[in-house]
Image: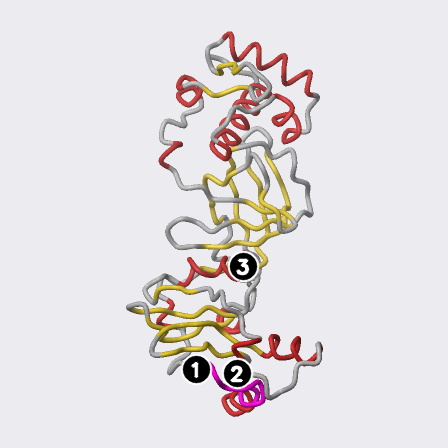
Amino acid sequence: MDLSQIQKEILITLITLYHQTSAAIKGEEIAEVLKRNPGTVRNQMQALKALGLVDGVPGPKGGYNPTALAYKELNLVNYEQEAHVPLSQAGEVVKGVRVSEIDFTTLCHPDVCHALIKLIGSVKVFHIGDEITIGPTPVNKLFIKGEIIGKDEVQQSLLISILEMISLPKKSVRTYMNTPLITIPRDATMREAIQLFVTHHIHGAPIVVEGRLEGIVTLTDIAKAIDTGIPLDTPICQVATREVVEVDANTRLYEVIRRYKEKKIGRLVIMEDDKPVGILTHSDIIGLFPSL
């Protein structure tokens, strides 16, 4: 069937939003993504419904769902099996848009590196000069940051000048963790903890008792305690953090990077057979990948 450009944009945006939320999508949500008038989207939805491309869901939480015919019409028969490759702008993932293909158009040029980014979703929300970040890609965990220098609303693609490109390694965290693990006894004082940190040039250490991880104490914990008037001879168990973020030693590095942002932490304790064997800090990651 012969769909108009606006109908294709609405249908693609509906499918993208539907797979992000697994819920019916309202016409207003699609209009917001496409920067279109909600009335225009609602009118087109009725036409798409008549064509059998969308189903209406009644009720306050209702909206529209794409039909199997919609996937076939847009040649998205394997859409559900495809990995989601996000696209971010100003640190926020762009809703209703995902990357389907990256074509390096000037990879061999000595001074220029451009890429053509093909999207599932509308390019209308992007403007020349915007900086975007793509990734991670599913296989090589590739991140690309670039500036938009062109866009094609018919082909749903962006042309970017690449500013940075990083591929996260697939090796496990055991490759990068700090060992041997420097620990501190539960009955040590804050003064002794500071001495330990200075001696080993570290900013924190886990508390381990008979091979069991019982907490972690950092310079930040001690500084906060001193600021409230707690004396330096106080046992560290009284100021330590009990909830420690642990990671199995076989976990791949790229899988744990987002935990630093999600948990807002500075270090992870690496575990093997339920015993702490190493530590990986945010500074270690920055040292490996300064652009992160």
Read off the residue under disc 3.
Answer: 263
Q: Which residues are magenta?
A: 184-194
**Drawn side of residue 200 relative to residue 180, left or right:** right
| Residue sitting at x 49%, y 13% | 2
Tell me the distance, in whole angstroms, between the alpha carbons under discs 1 and 3.
22 Å
Q: Nearer the viewer, residue 49 or 215?
A: 215
Asked whether residue 203 is drawn in magenta, I would say no
Instruction: Work out which quarter of the rendered image holds the C terminus and state it.
Output: bottom right
Q: Point out residue 136 in the picture as x, y percentages from the top left corner.
A: 47, 51
Tell me the distance, in whole angstroms, between the alpha carbons under discs 3 and 2.
21 Å
Q: Helix, strand, or loop for circle 2?
A: loop
Q: Helix, strand, or loop for circle 1?
A: loop
Q: Point out residue 144 in the picture as x, y percentages from the top left corner.
A: 52, 54
Classify 10 Å Cα crowding around label 1: few (below 14), some (14-19), many (20 and above).
Answer: some
Tag 2 or tag 1, which sits nearer the N-term?
1
Q: Nearer the viewer, residue 4 or 16?
A: 16
Classify 10 Å Cα crowding around label 3: few (below 14), some (14-19), many (20 and above).
Answer: few
Read off the residue under disc 1.
Answer: 183
Tell me the distance, in whole angstroms, between the alpha carbons under discs 1 and 2.
11 Å
Q: Is residue 9 shown above or below 221?
A: above
Q: Which labelled disc corresponds to residue 202?
A: 2
